[in-house]
Amino acid sequence: MRLRVVAHTVGVILRYFALIVILPLVVDWLYGGWWESLGFLLAGLSAAAVGQALSRLSPPGERLIRVEGLAVVALVWLVVAAFGAIPYLWSGLGVMDALFESMSGFTTTGATILTDFSLYSRGLFFWRGMTQWLGGMGVLALFIAVLPALAVAGRQLFFAEAPGPSEERLTPRIRNTAIALWSLYAGLTAFEAASLTIAGLPLYDAVCNSFTTMAAGGFSPHPESIGGYGNPAAEWIIIGFMFLAGANYSLQYLAVRGRISRLLRDEEFRVYSAVVIGFGLLLFGALTLFSRDLPSAYLEAGTSAQPLAGAGPLTLLRYGLFQVLTIVTTTGFATDDFNLWSDGARMIMLILMFVGGCAGSAAGGPKIVRLWLLGKQAARELLRAVHPNVVKPIRLGGRVVPPEVMHSITSFTWFYLAIFVASTLILVGLGTDIISGITASIATLGNIGPGFGAVAPMNSYAGFPFLGKLVLFLNMWIGRLEVMTIVVLLQPRVWQGARLDRRSPTGSSMPRRSPRETV
Amino acid sequence: MRAIIAGSGEIAYHFARELAETRDTIVILEEGEDTTRFDRLDVQVITGSPADVEVLEAAGACREDDFIACSDIDEKNIIACLTAKEACGARTICFVSKEEHYRTFSSRSGRRPWRFIDRIIWPQYMLAEEIARTVLVPGAIYVEILAGGRIVLQEYRIPERSRLTGRALVSLGLHPGVLAVAVARNEEVRIPRGQTVFEAGDKVTFMGTPGALRSLERSFFKRRGEEKVRNVTIVGGGNVGGILAELLEEAGDVRVKIIERDPERCEELAADLSTTLVLYGDGTDLELLDVEQIYLSDVLVAVTSDDEKNLLCALLAREMEIPKTITRVSSAMSMNLFEGLGIDVALNPRRTAVHTVLGMLQDTRARLLAVTEQGKGSVLELDVPAAFEPTRLRDLPDTEGAIIAAIIRRGETFVPHGRDRIEPGDRLIVFATQEAAPTVESFF
């Protein structure tokens, strides 16, 4: 591991990141927040300065070896979150709170420590939505798309950051793939913003909510999330776009280019659709039962409208589908304080927190495809019990899944659960109740956002102690980079021979690796 | 009108032997290949690469010649055909053993056909297809589907104590949609007459409409629990075994188990096949056969590359009382041995391909549809010329060695009897013995 080369690459990215941080400045100016806008200027200038300093540590053009690529990805996400936190600090948040909110943004989690939304400027909420939008398709993917300098290391960085075990190649060049995905992503976001404006949302809210829908993020400038707008048409629109955000963007790109059958025939997409529809109907049923006999607690507390009281089936279906999608795609919007719903309804949502969307989507979580393949592997053992000599590969969409991929999925699942268990234990040890501890832990690790109890959608993460926030902060980071990137770097053997000088450990400045190797 | 054969293997030898009887035959052998076998035949042997223009010129290849590329290596055959076609314009027949080559170069691919290959032959596929057809008809030992499924040929072995023995054919009361077209006894194929009496052990070929053959099977060849074939075991997952499993999967409603010895080949098979159960192990491993309940199979197909292993599997199958076994036999000698041991169906992959090609090479009006009994019988299709005077079947001159099995007239297919007329424009499906086949067209 050549630390200087890693630092150089991080620096290059940070330098350009500085340009992005400046953007919400304009929004603040438009809405008259002159003082608030200085926070973005400060963030931009410091990112540029630090980026410049880091990038001079090593000459450009060095090839990254595998672990260096992982380190770059892990570090970029940390550093970007740190500089992205500066505007929050400027608005008066504490250091841990600002870091938490910033990481929650970039990792598209949507967990917030903000309690009173009226204290902050429009530029800050725009920034909050924009961080999710950037994080949704991947910060590195964006830079790979726009920066030719990164093209060499692009492949491994791209796949280390991309969600899910999929290596969908749209174009032979990784840069063109990144461009294709980003343009689709931007197009869908614009389309959603236009639809929401037509449905009656103010332009500012339409844009901010579109940013966070397509990124499966879940931040909303409205303190009561999407439910606060009281606009059923907008909710249906968001239901549609959340569904797309949870599906594979590469396949959607092919669909837009006329090869729609690739998407419709995709096995994961089919399972995903079945999960959404199946659980949507299940939750619809649970809500129907719940709405017949609403407890007084629900009528007293909750939102001003108490929307489920006396609701018709279409309304209940909308609530059911919306919440199922918001959890499966790990967006984390809310149209009602679902913490007040019946245990049956909440149980359905708790289960879905352990699922996640499709590989190659903006969604977090373990991903449908991993769970589906693990299920197939389990079923194969049943067959093997009867036919000990049987040879049967695991297939996905007719293609054989190589055993190495199955091994990595098993390994991912184990570490995912281990981190979930460990962070839950720490949270509960710090005095959190079990329901809040479990859901806060999975909602951050799966990049979902809201959970139940203390972290319900109408509550916030502000109540956790410093250490609790730190654990959740790490959960979001680890979860977004799909666990293994970080876990691999935690091994001491990766750091043996780490050095600050420029040469590679073997003495050659161009470490050899096979061209097909990816991270 | 010469035949040029490029290749040195079993197939090349068969071609040389058969073709040398009727025309000038040249065999091109590569440097270092054994010529002794060919020296015994009346053929000219040239040494060199068949993809070498100079070698082809030395052979004097020209437009009228037939060029058969039948070495074991696909790429060699393809290049040889390309050279022969481009340099000399000969009619080319190319043997391949890989699916992708067949797919690419066959005219069935739907794309623009490749001009340098006139006919492409995939022997393993032909064999697998033949086995698949035979597997799916429980009692039959050979099945051929003709005229788009409107006419079926099925061969049966007459069992002991059958109602078909001891009486003349006319008095058996066969379904009018069925004709007995051939009887094979002591390795000799004859066309049965009305007075012919079948004996147990005879192999009788019937042709007719599918419905009529089903009723024939029901009334004369029904064995225990054999309404339909449900469980098939394939021993040997090589080329033929793999294709066979795929064909049986396509047929649907059949549970296929395939036993293969090579773990890597098992992985390949498992990747290519979907419902077939791929089992890693040896087909003669009794414990494996027991655990997998192979004794419940309706048919066992032994298609390993080893004749002896196939024989052993077939004998084990008989021990397990599996109703039907089909085995692959490479050498003609073991063929007779197998039949002598009472193994129902033994098939030789090369013979089928060779006889199909020989049929193609005959420049006659009659088209060869199928061959039976290793070429001793053949099914031909021919069109009745417009000048032909309509004639009742029984008024036709005596056609020793040939029988009209079906008439296709204006899209309708029927099995003719003595009173039926043959009219100009009819398309006839004729069964003929090897001796009579070349003369069939002279009747009209």
Image (spheres, grey):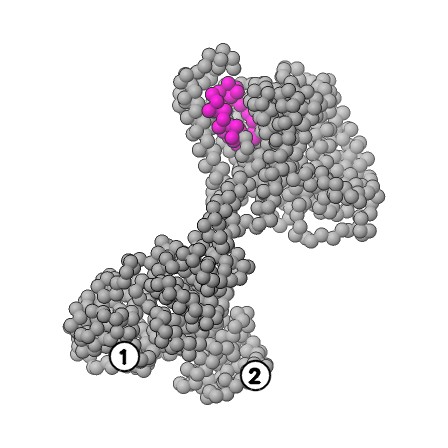
Q: Where, quadrant-wise, is the C terminus of chain B in this rendering?
A: bottom left
> Looking at the image, is A19 positioned above or below residue B133?
above
Residue range highlighted in magenta:
A324-352
Q: Where is residue A383 in the image (x, y as percent from the top left)?
A: 46, 48
Q: Name the residue under label 1.
A: B190
For mark 1, give the secondary structure. Answer: strand
Tell me the subunit letter for badge 1: B
Horizontal side of residue B415 vs B52, given as left or right: left
Tell me the subunit letter for badge 2: B
Q: Name the residue under label 2.
A: B47
Looking at the magenta stretch, what is its main secondary structure? helix
Which sits in the foreground, A70 or A59? A70
- Give the Cα distance between marks 1 and 2: 42 Å
Tell which tag, 1 or 2, sits nearer the viewer. Answer: 1
Q: Position of residue B334 (x, y in %)?
A: 42, 76
- Identified at 69% across, 41% down, the residue is A488
Which sits in the foreground, A471 or A506? A471
Residue A78 is drawn in which quadrant? top right
Residue B375 painted magenta: no
- The answer to whether residue B85 is visible is no
- Identified at 48% across, 57% down, the residue is B279
- Identified at 49% across, 26% down, the residue is A347
Label 1–label 2 contact, CB within 8 A: no
- Identified at 46% across, 12% down, the residue is A296
Neighbours of disc 1 within 10 Å: few (<14), some (14-19), many (20+): many
The amino acid on which the numbered mark 1 sits, given as a three-letter code, is Arg
On the same chain, marks 1 and 2? The answer is yes
> Looking at the image, is A99 positioned above or below residue A415?
above
